Each structure stands twice: as structure tokens, then as C-alpha cells.
Image (spheres, coloured by chain):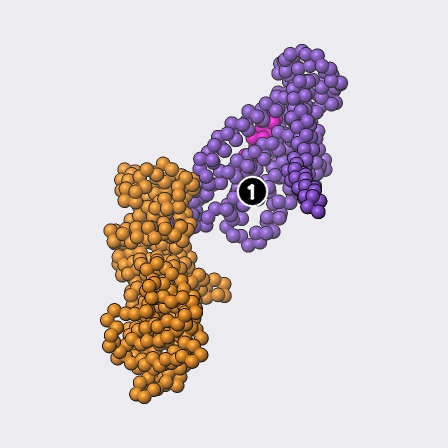
Chain colours: A purple, B orange
Amino acid sequence: MGKETSKANDKKLRNIKFRNRLGNLIPKIMIAPTFTVSLVCVYGFILWTIWISFTSSKILPKYDFVGFEQYNILFTQEPRWWVASLNLFIFSGLFIAICIALGLTLAIFIDQRLRGEGVFRTIYLYPMALSFIVTGTAWRWIMNPSLGLERLVQQLGFSDFTFRLLVESNVAIYAVVIAAVWQSTGFMFALFIAGLRGIDNSIIKAAQIDGASLKKIYLRIIIPSLRPVFLSAVIILLHLSIKCFDLVMALTSGGPGYSTDMPATFMYAFAFNRGRLAFGAASAVIMFITVMAIIIPYLYTELKGTRNAR
Amino acid sequence: MASLTITDIRKKFGSQEVLKGISLSINASEFVVLVGPSGCGKSTLLNLIAGLETINSGEIKIGDDVVNDVQPKDRNIAMVFQSYALYPNMNVEKNLSFGLETRKVPRDEIKKTVDHVANMLQISELLKRKPAELSGGQRQRVAMGRALARDPAIFLFDEPLSNLDAKLRVDMRTEIKMLHQRIKTTIVYVTHDQIEAMTLADRIAIMKDGVIQQFDTPQQVYDNPSNLFVAGFIGSPSMNFIPCTVIKQNEDTGVIFKTGEETSFFIPIKRTDLSLTEWIDKDVIIGVRPEQIASGFHLQEGNKQIHEIMCTVQVLEPTGPDTLVFVNINDTKVTCRVNPLDAKQPGENMKLMVDISKVLVFDPDTKMRIGNVA
């Protein structure tokens, strides 16, 4: 009798031990697939891309080593790469600056407790619901001289009116900026209004009593204390602009000519359309390094600052 | 420093009237505390004085100037907020000097003022730090420093201590009082804590539902509350309210304290300042502070105002210097403050002495004091 109970106890004990071990294992089992997938598909392929960029692969990967030859070609013999780089520079600069400026301005206006705030919020946020493909297509029609704005105004009787942003190769990149700004400003507005609402109302009261004008309160106190929001805004917009591919494809397909090429479309064109895998990989690596060069120092200074401050 | 005169102020938010005709006359260099439960309108009143809200009717005078339509910055006031409201992006020094800079005070003078204030509040070592790097008490000091730096005519404090922990709150309370004794600026101080009100104020204004219930010195408010609300709000533990019927027994008017099924005591109420002859056979509420029901009083022999009753102890709450004994009188829970050595255990009977020399009587219908209200 006593023996049997002890046996049963043993079994129970083993059961509990097994369950405990299982309980400890379950979280690891659960995250293992995503961990493996991201390890291989993100970091693995980053390494693979870097490797490929040092080979002479054409349509299919070829694992020979040619050193920096592809990079050499990219920087010295390929004017299209410089166009793409300059476009990225213009695009991201304008896109980030205008989005933040417009979003912040809208947020400040709405923050004055406007009537019908909810309606404005929805209107501004709505473009977010569209994908860049839809935005690009819609704006391609709007800015197309024979379909959109130019034709409309001309039909209204202003026959001299021209709006040729999309078809002039030296300004077409600004058309991309306009479409992208239209799409993303609402999101910036939402970020900033959340930031503004997070600021203690009594700070504004204190500043009023301290004699600061509304303009000064915003410039000296409120906007500077939105620093963490600016950080998020810049990071979000920067990565949007660097990976900007679908918008360009839908709006201009990189044209006229290759005047609105961006590094992402450039990479796609060479690696997949023209069958120069190694060359495309080299441009991808340069994009990667650029992003790291911008983001790492920025994150470092910002996060260090906030850790001290909070 | 300046006086502050408020005449019949009314304020509505939408259809709800928050302040229903407030009048206060505050002398120069006086420390006035506005106290009341949340929602009584005390913070609104402070915002009106500051000019952060506009009044619907009435008049606010700072010194001899009507300031109804004057901007907050031109009212020569400074305010300390509950959340401190420090500018998060500026260091302490900038926080202190911001108000002076906007007023275009010369730079060397700003520097002198900031140093002076920082010394006075012992925050000199913190000048280069950001608010986020400070503790609650330090932020509190900086907030006071910012107000001090401006050298205003009136200081407004909006529940400045309620975000601090209990010990720090007591320390800062003393510091605020010392500060006031030194700088002698008029202070209007809002709090919901009646202990803060009692300890700090020269005069207390007790508010409820947008109306000032009483405006008097702490001692007067404690001893001579004008109505049931003030009596119950001021004092901790709060005053006992015992419903009674006034009766005439022999030649004395008084009330019955029923402490058990078979025990009841007649308490004659005979005082020069209080006559209940008009209230015979009517209901009243007797207000007795816990310290007026004790195990014994100094010089109690032969004192006609002290009466003995027997009660059954329900609960004990030792506080250290005294023990609070809860008993039932007329089916109401009554708190008594007794000597810890005399306290009996729950369930036991205990002899208690009631001192009626300061007992208050209230009309249960109007909730107002009966008798001479000083």
C-alpha cells in the first residue's frame, strides 16, 4: 500500500517535472520559428548580398571573388547611380522636411481645440489608408498633362496654363515628393498631435504667467519638448524614403528616362531586369551602409540623451 | 506684496455654475488657504485670480487695480502648479530665468536674481540639471524658485504638495511657511488637505459647491465652525455628529446620550453662550470633537461642564500619543481620543468624560450652527 502510493507519488512528481520543463520550453519553442526565419531571411541574406556583391554574378549567382570591381563600376562608370543617389538625397531631404513641417503645423492648429477636430483628423489621416501604389497611380493621373490638372485648367479657359512636373526630367523628382508628402503628412500630424496632447497643460499656463507669447511658448518650450517625437518622425520618414520603390514605380516608373530613379529602383532594374546580380547587390550594400551611417549616430546621440534625461 | 479683493465672482462652464458669487478680501502679506473637497471650485478660483480663465461677472482687484481684463503676465503674480509645470527642455537655471528673460530684465540682473533664489532654496548645485533629472522635492523647490525669481505681488499655489510623499510633504510645508515668514508676500494657496490648511494659513477659506462656507483664522474655523460642513471638514479625526432630541429635565435643558440597551445619560447643556430653551422637544445635532470625549481632563473635579458616561468599546485605533476609541452613542459611531493607558479592550465597558464647554449644536434642517456664532 505504502509502496504503491510512493510509486504513484513518483509518477506524479515526474509528471510535474516534465510539465515544468515543458513550461520553460514553450516560450523558446514559440519564438524559435520567427527567430530562425529572421536570422536566415534578414541577417543571412544581408550577409549573402554582401558576399554576392564581391562576385561577378550575372543572372545566376556565381561564387567567384572579384574584389571591389562591382563597386568600382558603380561609382566610376555608371552615371545612373549618381542620378539615383542625388534623387534619394533630394527626395528624402524634402520629403522629411515638408512632412514634419506640415504635420507639426497642422497639429498645432488642431491643438487649439478647434471645433470638428475629429473630422479634420480623419481627413488628414485618410491618405495613410492607401498604399503607395494607389497614391502613385492617382497622382500620375492628376499630374498627367493630357489627363489631369493641366487639361482641367486649360478647359476652364486658361489655355496658357502648363503643369509639366511629371514629364520634365529635371523636375520630375519633385512630383514624387508631392505625392509622398500627401501620403505621409497625415501620419506626422497624428504623431505630433499625440505629442502635443502629452504635454502638461499647466506648463503652458506657467509660461503664460511667465509672460511668454503663444509663439514663444511654442518655439521655446513646446516644440523643443517634442524632441522624442521628432526622433520617431525622422526615423519613420527616413526609412520610408530609402525603401521608396512602389511610389516611384507607380508614379513615374523611374522616368522620364531614368531621371526619377532611386537607389531601390536602380537596384531592382540592374539585379532583376538586366541580370546583373552582383552589380545590383553592390548598390544594395551601399544603400545599407548609408542607412547605417545615418541611423546609428542619430540613435546613439538621441538615446544617450534621453537615458540621461529620464 | 499687495492686497487682493474679490467681489461677487461668478464663473460658468457651459450651463454649470462653478463659482456662485465668491467674495474675499485678502490683506497684503497674508497667507490665505482655499480648502474644500474636489470639485468645489477652489482651483477655478485660483485660475481666475491668475487670469488663466475669464470671469463671467464680478471684480478682481490686486492692490488698487481692477485686473478683470489684464493678461496673466501683467497681473504681477506667480503661480506654483501641482505638477510643478517645469519646462522640460530647459535646465533649472533656464527655468528660473525664463520669466525674467521674457520681461527683458538685463542679463547681469537675471544672473544675480537666479543666484539669490537658488541660494535661498538650496538648489544652487542643481542649476545645470534638467527637470527630469530631479527628485520630486527638488522639482518642487525649482517650481517655487521660478515663482520667487519674479518677485511678484501675489503668489498662487495650486496644491503644490499633493504629488510628494507624506514625509516630504510635511517638510516642504514647514519650508513654505518659513519662506512666507521671510518674504512676506501675499499668498493664496489651494489644497484639499485640511491639515495643510490649518498649519499654513493666516486665514482659511472653506469652499463647497462654489460657495465660501467660512473665511476665518484656523483657530476660529476649528472652534467656531459656522455650519455642519465646516465642522466636519476641519479637524482630524473629524468631529462627531450625534443626533439628539433636546429635553427638559428638572430645571435643566439638555440631551440624552444613549450608549447601550439600558444605559443612557442626561447631559445638561448650560452655557452662557448657548441656550437651547427654544429647542425643547426638537431634534438637533450635537457636534463633539474626539478630544472632548476623553478618559479624563485636567482639573475635572467639580467642573460642571464635564459629564461622565459609560460606553462599550467597539474598536481601538492606537495613534501613539493617544488612542482613538470608537463607541456608539445614539446609534452613531463616535470617536473619542483617550489616554492609551486608560483604553479598554473592545467589548469592555469604559468610563468616558464628556466636556460640553466647547460642544456645538446644529440645526439638522438648515445644517447651520445654533447659538452665538462668533
Amino acid carrying mark 1 in the image = Leu
Q: Nearer the viewer, residue A123 or B15?
A: B15
**Residue A89 in sight here:** yes
Q: Nearer the viewer, residue B103 or B119?
A: B119
Horizontal placement of B57 versus A269: left or right?
Answer: left
Label 1: few (<14), some (14–19) or many (≥20) C-alpha neighbours in 10 Å: some
Judged from this view, the residue extending furthest toward the bottom is B250
Bounds of the magenta segment:
A86-98
Question: The residue marked by circle 1 belongs to what chain?
Answer: A
Q: Is residue B217 above or below residue B280?
A: above
- Circle 1 residue: A191
Query: Which of the 4 quarters of the picture holds residue B314?
Result: bottom left
Q: Is residue A204 a member of the stretch shown in magenta?
A: no
Q: Nearer the viewer, residue A224 or B228?
A: B228
Residue A135 image offset from top left, x and y in percent: 68, 38
Q: Nearer the viewer, residue A5 or B98?
A: A5
Q: Is residue B358 above or below residue B254?
A: above
The structure residue drawn at horizontal position 68% and vertical position 24%, both measured from the top left corner, is: A45
Judged from this view, the residue extending furthest toward the right is A60
Residue A156 image offset from top left, x and y in percent: 68, 43
Dot 1 falls on a residue whose secondary structure is helix
Residue B153 image offset from top left, x and y in percent: 29, 53
Horizontal placement of A25 versus B333: left or right?
Answer: right
**Residue B11 in sight here:** no
The structure residue drawn at horizontal position 29% and vertical position 75%, both measured from the top left corner, is: B306
Q: Is residue A144 above or below residue B200?
A: above
Query: Which of the 4 quarters of the picture holds residue B93?
Result: top left
The structure residue drawn at horizontal position 25% and vertical position 53%, both measured from the top left corner, is: B181
Residue A294 image offset from top left, x and y in percent: 55, 27
| Magenta span main SS | helix
